[in-house]
Amino acid sequence: MISLIRSINSNEDYKKRLILFLKIFIALISGIITILWIILDKAELPNQIFKMIVGVWIMGLALLSIPTPRKEKLPQIFSLVEIIVISCLWLFVEVESKGVEIFMQNGSLTLVNGLAFSMLLFLMTSGFFLIFGLADIINFAHGAFFMLGGFMGYEVYLLSESFLITIPFLGNDPVLLSFICFIFGLIGATIILGLIGIGIEVTTIRRLFRKPISQILLTVGFLYIILQLTEIIWGPAIFTYNYVSGSQTGIFWLPRSAILDLGGGMRFEIYRIFLILFGLVIAIGMFLVLSRTRIGLIITAGIEDPEMVNALGIDTKRVFTLVFATGAAMAGLAGAVAVPQVNASLDVAGNYLIYAFIIVVIGGAHFGRFAGTFWASIIVGLSHTFCQFFYPGLESIILFLILLAILTFKPGGLTGEPM
Amino acid sequence: MVTHTNSNKNKQKQSIITKISDLISANQVSISVITVLYLLPLLTNSELSPLRGFINLLSGFMIAGIFALSFDLQLGRTGLLNFGQAAFFGIGAYVTVWCLDPILPSPLGDILNLIPFPLTLVAAIFAGMVVGIVMGATTNRMKGTAFAFIALAIAMLVLEFMELKENLAISGGESGLSVTRPFLLTNWIVYMLMVLFVIFILSLFVILVVKDTRERFAFLFLNFRPRRSAFSYSEKERISSTRVTTSWIIGVAVFILLLILVVPNILDMYLFATDIWFKIPILYWLILTSVLAVYIFVKRLTISPFGRVLSAIAQNEDRVKALGYNTFYYKILSVTISGGIGALAGSLYTVNNINVSTPETFGIGQAINAMLYTILGGLGTLLGPFVGAVLIEFSEWRMVRFLWTFSIDGQWWLVFLGIIYIFIILFFPYGIVGSLQLRSRSLKTRIREGWFNIRETDYWWLTLISLVLILALMLDLENIMKRIVEIFEQIFSLFP
């Protein structure tokens, strides 16, 4: 084994040929197995084998993203054709078994749900990406920020309602009152989490600048503190806007049953569409800030090469305070927006932290671009929702399969520097 | 010719004896620590006592320490941040389950059931090494975060595989599987064998005491000699210079004194104990022995050329490549060895806990724990992971009661734990042991010359006393804290 590896390392030409051969081999095998699976019908095979095949299929998908010189385009083209064929076959099987209408209904519903989920993920992860890119900190407290944002938004909502209800024209219109209070809640959660972020950065994280391993322990400490304080203050209860417990009017501006009916069985929840639009607006705003303003350009440059930015006379430490506060504030905003959808509870912290990890690594962590995070969150959100709908039980495994496949062939992530 | 060979043999014999005595005098501190740790279970008899529970707790801490050490072998030595460490732990734990229980179905069928108990640890180590090879071979080209997350993905894949509905019979799901306890763990013969081993270690300790007293109190012995400085005569001269018998009388007296402490307990265990009473001491000794084995192995590994290459990779991989080393191969081996040690920790966890479930062993919490232990104790220090593990596990266990003594509500425990982590890492940025090692030289000279005039030979008994004090403090922390609080209250009540 070792001698084989050595011989491969010594002989570059042989290595290239071997890799080319391996690529074609993987693509071929995965294609054959998948086509066999579709022909044989998935019910015949046990569930485990089916899941392994999906894994192989994703390996084939990952072949697409290999950066290779022109001579070696063959496996990429091969796997692209194969993926298109397999997707067509899958569509054909689904449509045949369930009928066109039902397929269209399910597909569009999951598309909207998935996009809403991925926008939520993007809102949360953008801050994580900025913090990670600029200062190399794996912020374990980010999920806790997200969770705290939900609770803060809820509290500010109740507080502003108790103030605004005394104004006569708002007091008579509970729907408008609720909407204004919700906006106040979003702003309040953003500001409070931003302030918490500044506090944490100035008091502790700044002292351990450029010591990423020590900072893991620091952020885990903050994760524990925030989790336990939340449990002490609000208890293990789950907050939703369906039933606002401390509210005086008891009406939320958008009930859960608010649905946009496009006809043909395509019915979408309005809040999800609102989430998609909201996420897109914020994303465009952040893109503009990062690409047009001076501070945004400094941050972008700092993510790509912090030493060079330092050499140009800019204090990245000071910029980082702003970035950490922004990251925490974005997490808070995402948490507050998510509450009508996800509910505010303690479990959210851990789950969403893992999503943030996966998205940032897929998008390209070191030297990555902001667009990478956006596309990665769309990939993760869509694949998660589609699997939840079409193949329940697979949704937790598929994210790690995608992560494994993409990182195996592009270690730097989608936009990161190839190693 | 004959005389020549005879003298050669004599030389060899002498050299072995001097080697042993050299070994003892070189490792005074570690021998005294080992003796105290091995002696602990002999201080309990066949009744319920707080010490028995404490020993059980200590064995849990030591398992955590082994796991942390396996993590440190990657992060501290090779510079690989591995978030998937829980995979090794879980594999070790589940292979042990499958080996020990003949009723439960296992993925390899009945072959695993043929392995007798102590060898199951070896089987678990092999399984962990296989997972390590797979993980290392897929991640060898990555650095930093990419490595961490690929490892995490592999660990999560294993976790998800175990949690599938079809695999519930193998994994037991969230409620977990319960194992029948191995016969050897509840057997009085094994207990007695271990007692013999402990007595052997005690005798080593007694030799240490004898050597030390002979040097220290030379004037007490019959052939009085003026004390010279340590550099003026050699070890052989020193041995021949004092008469052996007198010092040995002292040694035997110490030995008998220790035995008097211990023998009634052993007799009590032999006469009155049922099988279950033997479990905790035997397990404690088993775990302690494996801790020592792993510790010595890792220590030898880091000193060896292989370990040097690993730490060179951690510092600058490109330069190591340029020197002609195949870093690829070294990284895989590092992950593999660490996988074996992690699986050993998981296997001991199964034997200790009896009940094993997937979220507890394969879950991400286990990997985060290993990371916390290592970073808190100090990266790349052999002792650090153990210190971190004991500190964190102990504070998790005792924090609630500790807060009660200050009349603080128990649910604040995690908040205080987080605050403690933050303060420790702010004041010891390289971990407790790591930061102390950085300053140890100035501390040592200060202690030696400025404060107490302590010599190298005094370290062992100082360590002995401080270890006993620490153990006593851990055993009965909140009573001691209560006393202190009461004393303070009395003092404050004096001033109205």
Image (spheres, coloured by chain):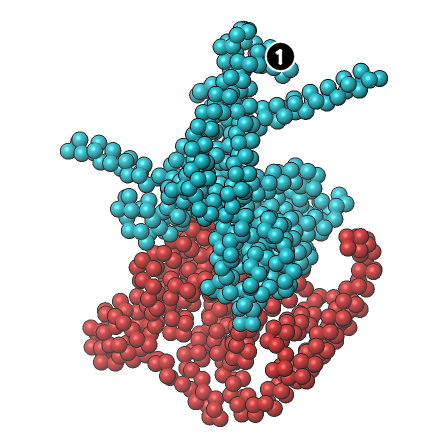
Compared to B6, does B433 lie above or below? Answer: below
Residue B246 spot, x, y in % from top left: 53, 13
Q: Which chain is cyan?
A: B
User: What chain does mark 1 sit on?
Assistant: B
Write the residue at 50% across / 48% down: B186
Residue A186 screen position, x and y as percent: 36, 68
Position of residue B162 relative to residue A104, above or below, is above
Nearest the viewer among B268 and A128 is B268
Chain A: colour as depicted: red
Quarter that holds the N terminus of chain A? bottom right
Inspect the image, locate mark 1, and give the three-letter code of the amino acid beneath it.
Answer: Ser
Q: Is residue A301 visible?
A: no
Answer with the quarter of the image where residue B235 lies: top right
Horizontal and vertical percent position of residue A75: 75, 72
Task: Identify the residue position indicated by label 1 in the image.
Answer: B240
Q: Determine whether the residue tagged by mark 1 lies in a helix, strand or loop.
A: helix
Residue lying furthest left in this view? B496
Q: Residue at point 51% right, 88% down?
A: A105
Q: Is residue A73 left or right of residue B209?
A: right
Q: Quadrant of residue A297?
A: bottom right
Q: Residue at x 83, y 60 (%)?
A: A14
Left or right side of A83 for A252: left
Q: Nearer the viewer, residue A51 or B414?
A: A51
Give the number of marks.
1
Q: Is there any visible trace of residue A163 in the rendered image? A: yes
Residue A26: image location, x then y, percent? 73, 70
Q: Residue at x 59, y 48 (%)?
A: B118
The answer to whether B435 appears left or right of B153 in the picture is: left
Quadrant of image for the C terminus of chain A: bottom right
In this rendered view, identify the residue nearer to me: B138 or B262: B262
